[in-house]
Amino acid sequence: MPSSTASVERLFSLMNNLCTTNRNRLSQDTLTALMMLSREGCRQLSDDQTSKIVEIFKKMKERDIAL
């Protein structure tokens, strides 16, 4: 058992930064993918993990909002 909860607290903090009131409809898969990208970075992920994340974003529907 870890003697500190700092790593868990960092993950919750990251999740709260990603899932804001403006982005409250993120699916679990999308939120997980964003957390992995934010935490690990593109270069740290395996090819399989990167492919799964790309597929998640490919399946997302287009939005009518121009950014």
Image: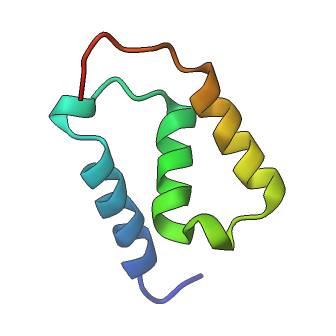
- Please report the residue visible at 41 percent of the width from the left and 64 percent of the height from the top: 11
Horizontally, residue 12 falls left or right of residue 62, namely left
The image shows residue 46 at horizontal and vertical percentages of: 78, 64
Instruction: Give the total of numbered labels.
Output: 0
Q: Can residue 5 be seen in this view?
A: no
Q: Is residue 50 above or below residue 56?
A: below
Q: Residue furthest top?
A: 64
Q: Is residue 45 above or below residue 5?
A: above
The image shows residue 30 at horizontal and vertical percentages of: 51, 36
Q: In this view, does 22 lie above or below 10?
A: above
Q: Residue furthest right?
A: 48
- Please report the residue visible at 23 percent of the width from the left and 29 percent of the height from the top: 67
The image shows residue 43 at horizontal and vertical percentages of: 65, 71
Q: Which residue lies furthest to the bottom in this view?
A: 3
| Figure quadrant of residue 10 | bottom left
Q: Can residue 13 be seen in this view?
A: yes
Q: In which quarter of the image is the N terminus?
A: bottom right
- Please report the residue visible at 60 percent of the width from the left and 64 percent of the height from the top: 42
- Judging depth in this view, the residue of 4 and 39 nearest the camera is 39
- Judging depth in this view, the residue of 41 and 19 nearest the camera is 41
- Please report the residue visible at 71 percent of the width from the left and 52 percent of the height from the top: 50
| Figure quadrant of residue 22 | top left
The image shows residue 36 at horizontal and vertical percentages of: 55, 58
